[in-house]
């Protein structure tokens, strides 16, 4: 298990004559990492990686803005992956490109985090409760068409002082 970089489902076979109880499986790093797989290597832009990492050390919200195809998403994913050891509760990639309605941003974030809203608990309140004292990084990708949802991100950051957000957007 030491060399696994991504989550892998493990099954236990139950049969007569086999042990039925085992201690919990231990791995080197138990931090959740929900980032898209990168199919090619990333060459160059070390200065950019360093600068974004420095900004995330200092600030809780960093936006990578630029034209489409400039590598914002790729840079954000690489930085998030490298910063995983600094976030005990993990790093999570939230793809917002398919989201068309600003009102769906909280439920999209909740879906990635595995947060369920209840009949008496609206999704934003459920997110605030879930994030509360967690130390994690949210990568909000393609935020440009959902700018009014910035107030939701602000609210989540207000409720969770150890959460940081790295957003990508074509608009500042």
Image: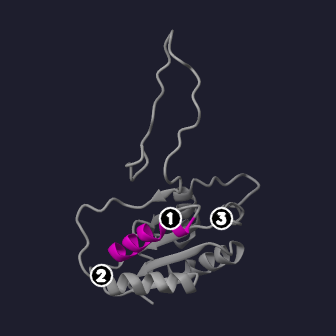
Q: Residue at the location (57% across, 53% down)?
A: 114
Per the rendering, the mark at residue 91 is 1
Find numbered disc 1 in the image and state the secondary structure of the residue it sits on.
strand
**Mark 2 or mark 1: which is in front?**
1
* Residue 150 at x, y percent in the picture: 57, 80
Q: Which of marks 2 and 1 is nearer the N terminus?
A: 2
Q: Which label's residue is closer to the chain start, 3 or 1?
A: 1
Is the residue marked by circle 1 packed among few (<14), some (14-19), or many (20+) residues within 10 Å? many
Spatial CA distance of label 3 from label 1 is: 11 Å
Contact between labelled residues 2 and 3, with CB atoms less than 8 Å apart: no
Q: What stretch is highlighted in magenta?
A: 73-87
Q: Is residue 21 above or below residue 9?
A: above
Direction top: furthest residue = 16
- Say left or right for 170 vs 108: left
What is the magenta segment's predominant secondary structure? helix
Location of the C terminus by quadrant is bottom left
Q: In the image, which disc is placed on residue 68?
A: 2
Q: Residue at x 26, y 72 (%)?
A: 42
Q: What element carries label 3?
A: loop
């Amino acid at each position: 298990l030491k060399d696994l970089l991504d989550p892998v489902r493990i099954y236990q076979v139950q049969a007569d004559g086999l042990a039925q109880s085992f201690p919990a499986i231990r791995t080197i790093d138990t931090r959740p990492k929900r980032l898209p797989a990168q199919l090619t290597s990333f060459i160059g832009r070390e200065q950019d990686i360093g600068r974004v990492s420095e900004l995330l050390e200092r600030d809780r919200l960093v936006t990578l803005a630029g034209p489409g195809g400039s590598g914002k998403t790729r840079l954000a994913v690489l930085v998030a992956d490298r910063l995983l050891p600094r976030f005990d509760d993990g790093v999570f990639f939230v793809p917002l490109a398919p989201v068309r309605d600003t009102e769906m941003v909280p439920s999209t974030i909740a879906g990635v985090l595995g947060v369920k809203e209840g009949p008496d608990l609206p999704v934003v309140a459920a997110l605030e409760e879930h994030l509360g004292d967690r130390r994690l990084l949210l990568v909000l990708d393609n935020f440009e068409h959902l700018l009014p949802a910035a107030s939701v991100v602000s609210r989540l950051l207000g409720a969770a002082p150890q959460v940081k957000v790295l957003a990508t957007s074509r608009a500042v």
